[in-house]
Amino acid sequence: MPPYDKDATVGWTFLSNYAHVLVCLARDPDITLREMAEQVGVTERAVHRIVCELSDVGVVAKEREGRRNHYTVCLDEPLRHPLEEGKTVGDLLSGLLTRSEMSKLHANVRAARKASNG
């Protein structure tokens, strides 16, 4: 995905930076903070804060692999606003990712569960 072009927008988007970071992590579990910052159009520091908050509430699991992090999105986590009651992170992502990307995401989640159980 090309870097975000701030000049190409009208000043707002439909999704928050949290959703944008979540999409980045869902598409590439080995993405760096710098790569996410470029794609989302915010600073690395902002991405770091968002990833930490998503991790703190259990939406994202972070595992250190060598010098990099590997992320697993927790698809069963509920969305946090009352308007989204009964919907999960997986429901949100299924509307934002292609079928191929969702299949890959589900495979990554299954592999992470298997690794943590075995």
Image (spheres, rainbow, N blue to C red):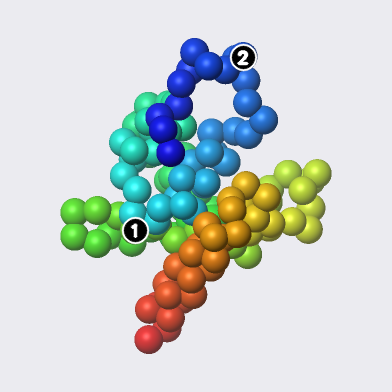
Report which residue position mark 1 lands on. 70
Q: Amino acid at mark 1?
A: His
Q: Is residue 53 left or right of residue 116?
A: right
| Viewer-side residue, 114 vs 102 | 102
| Label 1: which secondary element | strand
Q: Amino acid at mark 2?
A: Val
Indicate which disc, 1 or 2, sits on the residue closer to the N terminus.
2
Name the residue located 46 percent from the left edge and 52 percent from the top edge: 27
| Viewer-side residue, 109 vs 102 | 102
* Residue 107, horizontal then vertical, whole percent: 48, 71
* Residue 93, horizontal then vertical, whole percent: 62, 52
Residue 109 can be seen in this image: no
Measure how far apart labels 1 and 2 are at the Cα level. Answer: 34 Å
> So how many labels did they put on this image?
2
Report the disc number at residue 18.
Answer: none
Name the residue located 69 percent from the left edge and 57 percent from the top edge: 91
Residue 6 can be seen in this image: yes
Name the residue located 34 percent from the left edge and 58 percent from the top edge: 70
The nearer-to-camera label among 1 and 2 is 2
Query: Where the C terminus falls, by quadrant?
Result: bottom left
| Label 2: which secondary element | loop
Name the residue located 41 percent from the left edge and 33 percent from the top edge: 2
Report which residue position mark 2 lands on. 10
Q: Is residue 60 above or below residue 110?
A: above
| Crowdedness near tag 1: few (<14), some (14–19) or many (≥20) residues, C-alpha within 10 Å | some
* Residue 59, horizontal then vertical, whole percent: 54, 55
Q: Is residue 105 above or below residue 56?
A: below
